[in-house]
Image (cartoon, grey):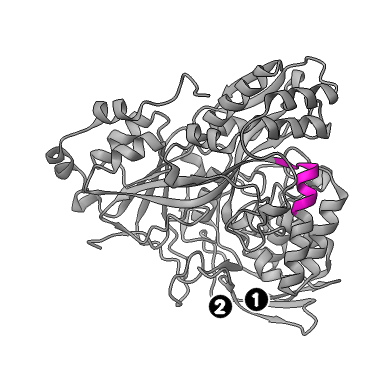
Amino acid sequence: MTPATTIKTTEKIAALKLSTALVAGLLFTSAANADTLRVMGGNLKIIDPIVTTSGDTLIHAYMIYDKLFEFDESGVPLPQLAEKVDISADNKSFTIKLRDGLKFSDGTPITSDDVIQSLTRWASRDQTGQLLRARTKDLVKIDDNTLRIDLTESFDVPSALAGITGNPAFIMPKRVASLPPTEALTDTVGSGPYQFDFSTWKPGQMRVYTKNSYYIPRDEAASFYAGRKEAVMDRIEFSYVPDPNTAMASMLTGKQDIWLDPPMANAVALRNNPNLKVVKGYSLQGLFVINHVVPPFDNVKAKQALTYLIDQKEINAIAVGDPEFWHACYAFLTCSGTYGNESVYDGHRGPANVEKAKELFNEAGYDGQPVVILDPTDWPEAHARALYLAQQLREIGVKVDLQAMDWGTLTSRRTSKEPADKGGWNLFPNVMEGQPASSPLTHLMLASSCEKAWFGWPCDKQIEDLRASFIRTVDIDEKKKIADELQARASAYLPFVMTGEYNVVMSYGLNIEGFIPSAPEPFFWNVRRKSQ
């Protein structure tokens, strides 16, 4: 199927193409503006990374907060704000010492009291944090620069604290971290390389970050999120430009330096410009989030019907486009990850089977009530997937209420557990970043811990027991065996429905260096102009 809204790439290229002479003259900013980086991204609406897992919020949070540990390019968690960690022989006690002289952006010292309160707030909300909290016997202050975590069983604490997505374990002042995790913060004093003035910002408007003069970078070389984080740019401006044509013109005329995740049609056009890079960014596992607590998808047969409606090749050809950037995948822990295994997937794969889907919906007792799909129209790839599934559902006689909204609004709406016809929802398109999606420890949407689970609230004891076994196990072969069992169980329970894997597209000027497109949550420390 092909939605009527499918973009005609060649027409867009012809309409927007600017002369090489114009672009060459305008691409590079003047020396006076060389210390300002301009980035186009999403619409930030919530600034608290413990309240939401929104990618826009995480980009913001990585600007102004730092963590005790960060992952390097090999996936090893290394000390960041921590100076060192001493681990007991039984892997049940972790003594963490902070680096000397650390300060927040208001000049106050970062102490173990701040860290303990930050970790307490984090563990009450984050999926991995909840796993750690369930195994924590004690979290104690040794002195102002040292704390200790004592556990009831073995657990990889540094990896948990280095987690990139979800609700990462950012370190905040104690007074800020004392706020209940259900209440959004307004105090943006942070521990990271940049600072943010909350008082001058409104959603939808440009937001500005400036150097945190109190931040002390590490001496080690930068490696992915770990190592030296240097605030090279004096000022970083983030703009929300929902119209892709306007955004593209801004890139071509040098008004913007970096465009995060441009639509494929625009990316193809940008490839023609010799002064811009268009590259593969981080990998994503495409999926539909399912609301498990309201009909009809509280019935497994209705969830199974969704798998018969989705042809991964078809949906990605429509939503992503260029086959260089996507592939079909039926591994719940990703096809490129250490633990991913498509062979244990026991559900439907391949072309859609609408007759089987209709049969399963009827067996689920579908009563004709509208299925509410939240449709993020400012996210082109997800919007296309929402249109696709809505049409497929209509083809089998399901009433569909496709509700258009921007992604920021969706992140607020998805918290509702009300019935779909009373302000709730049934489905929405989403992604998991490839790196965290490759492990049962960090895959947010695989966790099926009922009320404590991510939005959609999947609830399955077998999945949770297998995740617990995976976490306790050290031997890699045994971990893989458990991961296979977990993915087989997930194919029966369906905590979410997969739509294949793809890479986002990134575009930035040739005069920009230090930007890492493969980072699952983009960061902007160490980014500079080549003239600097």
Q: In which quarter of the image is the C terminus?
A: bottom left
Residue 285 image position (x, y, % from top left): 59, 47
| Disc marking residue 145 | 1
Q: Residue at x 63, y 64 (%)?
A: 338
Look at the image and give the residue range highlighted in magenta: 487-496
Place of residue 351 in the rendered image (x, y in percent of width and height, measured from the top left):
61, 34
**Label 2 to label 1: alpha-carbon separation:** 8 Å
Q: In this view, does 520 lie above or below 532?
A: above
Q: What element carries label 1?
A: loop
Label 2 crowd (10 A; few <14 / some 14-19 / many >=20): some
Which amino acid does the dot numbered 2 rest on?
Asp
Other-residue count near label 1 (Cα within 10 Å), few / some / many at <14 / 14–19 / ≥20: many
Which amino acid type is marked by label 1?
Answer: Asn
Report the residue at 52% width, 51% height from top.
283
Q: Are marks 2 and 1 in contact (CB under 8 Å)?
A: yes
Q: Is residue 368 above or below residue 200?
A: above
